[in-house]
Amino acid sequence: MKKIRKPSVSGYFYPGDKNKLVDNLKQYIVAEGEKISAIGAICPHAGYIYSGKTAGKVYGKIIPPETVIIVGPNHHGYGEPYAIDENDYWETPLGLVEIDNEIRKQLLAHSRYLQTDSTAHMAEHSIEVQVPFLQYIKPDVKIVPVVLSSYHDANPWYEIGYTIGLVLSECKTHIMVIASSDFTHYEPAEDAEKKDKLAIGAILQLDADNFLTTVSKNDISICGFVPIVTVITAAKVLGARKGILVDYSHSGQVSGDFQQVVGYAGIILDKD
């Protein structure tokens, strides 16, 4: 019997009705210019009304991959600290998405830290909100959901990134890695933009060490800083040479509250 992970934030972070969700995605996913066969990306994971525009610009820019490893933070602290979901499928209002079991097996075989665990994924929204975007641009896409906790020891974050890169380097199909993260949380828009610009600068240089230092030194409340480190590391193994800032926005542009904003960056990691 196939195991299916049911949606946790459908009807809350994004429409629970299929037709309304498709209408949302049509609005957000705008194809502009030549598409990129991206190695990796960083996308926000707030409610679509706030961050859908920024995420959609990334998804509208990439050539749809066959499989996507989606790396998200563990907001709730449930389950294993470095967890790949053990279900066979994820369900959204757009239907079922298959887990790429072969890639999952390879990651588990080569990593000292990754474990299968569905508890860590059960209530986590950071990966779930990416899935409808991927289904929209490629209905038969496969995913590998990975949740990482922000424990003090940074070694696993880098090691998991290296492992992802090495496993994918042996694959002949187009597989992407996506870090799911929002940026500065609940600060005035001017302060958030200044801080986020510093962090984005390090990401565009693919400098994970400098990114971590910048986040710590400037007290930047990026919830997915661990997935970003992991995805930068994986992308560099796969030959990425630069980051491209596709869009930056913040919640105040929707809510009208410029005193307590959350920042959203859409970034593509590419070879050229």
Image: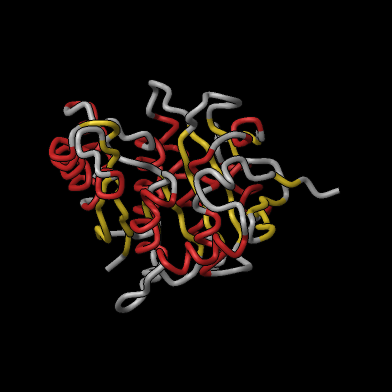
Q: Which corner quadrant of the image does residue 208 belong to?
A: top left
Residue 62 drawn at (x, y percent):
40, 68
How many tags in the picture? 0
Residue 2 drawn at (x, y percent):
81, 49
**Image position of 84 with respect to 120: above or below:** below
Q: Is residue 49 left or right of residue 204?
A: right
Of 76 and 170, which appears nearest the observer?
76
In the image, farthest residue toward the top = 152
Of 172 and 52, which appears nearest the observer?
52
Q: Is residue 31 left or right of residue 200?
A: right
Q: Residue at x 20, y 39 (%)?
A: 258
Q: Is residue 35 left or right of residue 135?
A: left
Q: Is residue 242 visible?
A: no
Q: Residue at x 40, y 64 (%)?
A: 28
Residue 79 drawn at (x, y percent):
61, 26
Q: Which corner quadrant of the image does residue 199 belong to?
A: top left
Q: Residue at x 68, y 60 (%)?
A: 95
In the image, farthest residue toward the right = 1
**Image position of 42 with respect to 73: above or below:** below
**Image position of 94 with respect to 124: above or below:** below
Where is the C terminus found, in terms of image quarters? bottom left
Q: Which corner quadrant of the image does residue 161 belong to?
A: top left
Of 224 and 211, which appears nearest the observer?
224
Q: Is residue 12 visible?
A: yes
In the image, farthest residue toward the front = 256
Which colour assignment does the render follow? secondary structure
**Image position of 1 with respect to 214: above or below:** below
Q: Is residue 185 left or right of residue 190?
A: right
Residue 143 drawn at (x, y percent):
59, 55
